Amino acid sequence: KAGVTQTPRYLIKTRGQQVTLSCSPISGHRSVSWYQQTPGQGLQFLFEYFSETQRNKGNFPGRFSGRQFSNSRSEMNVSTLELGDSALYLCASSLVGGAPYEQYFGPGTRLTVT
Amino acid sequence: SQQGEEDPQALSIQEGENATMNCSYKTSINNLQWYRQNSGRGLVHLILIRSNEREKHSGRLRVTLDTSKKSSSLLITASRAADTASYFCATVGAGGTSYGKLTFGQGTILTVHP
């Protein structure tokens, strides 16, 4: 089976712009979670989608949003980018997302905001 | 916010030696998992231990869990240079609201010298 794929792998944006990141889960996985990784805050949970519905959300401002399509592919959007949004954004998929579960991570999208 | 602390923050050993990493967490858990990350790339799942288990083995990995102390340890035996990576513990909270959410520790950077 193909692993989790994320596009693009690298992105450079200017403060104030918006960005959309894409994630394709492993075939058959219906749960997609998103994480932000920064040197200062570490790995932080953004949100989780299952069957096109957001089931869980972390403590991030409303500028961070996401969605999931009927084929389980997911996108996350960050509007009005700030310098502090520079990070590695990771998505992960699992079969159904209910505990216990292990997650399979993509390679990440490295976002740099200038 | 991070679940807890990992100890040590960095560990440097020679090939063939054992590496032990510790993780503490704050809230009740359904399970605890360990992940490996190479050079800021995606995370790879290593092992999962449920809250009612005390020890688990997988190849050269041994994980212990002490729920009374809210702590876990990961032992890698006979380390290899290829084990050089960052290691993270991650918890899944108890209760029914943890869909798709892993709460990560700060990580331990392991360097194995040939």
Image (spheres, rainbow, N blue to C red):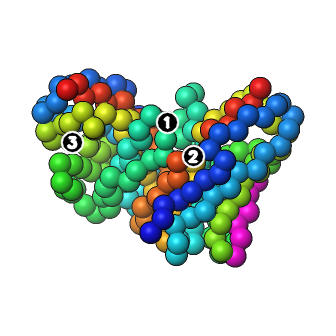
Chain letter behind tag 2? A
Q: Secondary structure at mark 2?
A: loop
Tell whether B111 sits left or right of A25. Answer: left
**Relative depth, front residue between A14 and B55:** A14
Magenta stretch: dominant SS?
A: strand
Is A107 contained in the magenta span? Answer: no
Tell whether B50 sits left or right of A54. Answer: left
Q: CA distance from mark 2 to mark 3?
A: 27 Å
Q: Quadrant of the N terminus of chain B?
A: top right
Q: Is residue A33 above or below residue B11?
A: below
Q: Which residue is mark 3?
A: B75
Q: Is residue B31 above or below residue A15?
A: below
Which numbered disc, 1 or 3, marks the residue closer to the eye? 1
Tell whether A67 sits left or right of B45. Answer: right
**Relative depth, front residue between B65 and B8:** B8
The answer to which quarter of the image holds residue A12 is top right
Q: Residue at x 12, y 33 (%)?
A: B16
Q: Which residue is mark 2?
A: A108
Q: Position of residue B72 (x, y in %)?
A: 29, 45
In this picture, which residue range is highlighted in magenta?
A: A65-70
Numbered mark located on residue B40 in the image: 1
Let me know if residue A18 appears in the view.
yes
Q: Are marks 2 and 1 in contact (CB under 8 Å)?
A: yes
Q: Residue at x 53, y 35 (%)?
A: A42
Q: As shown in the figure, which amino acid type bears the numbered disc 1?
A: Gly
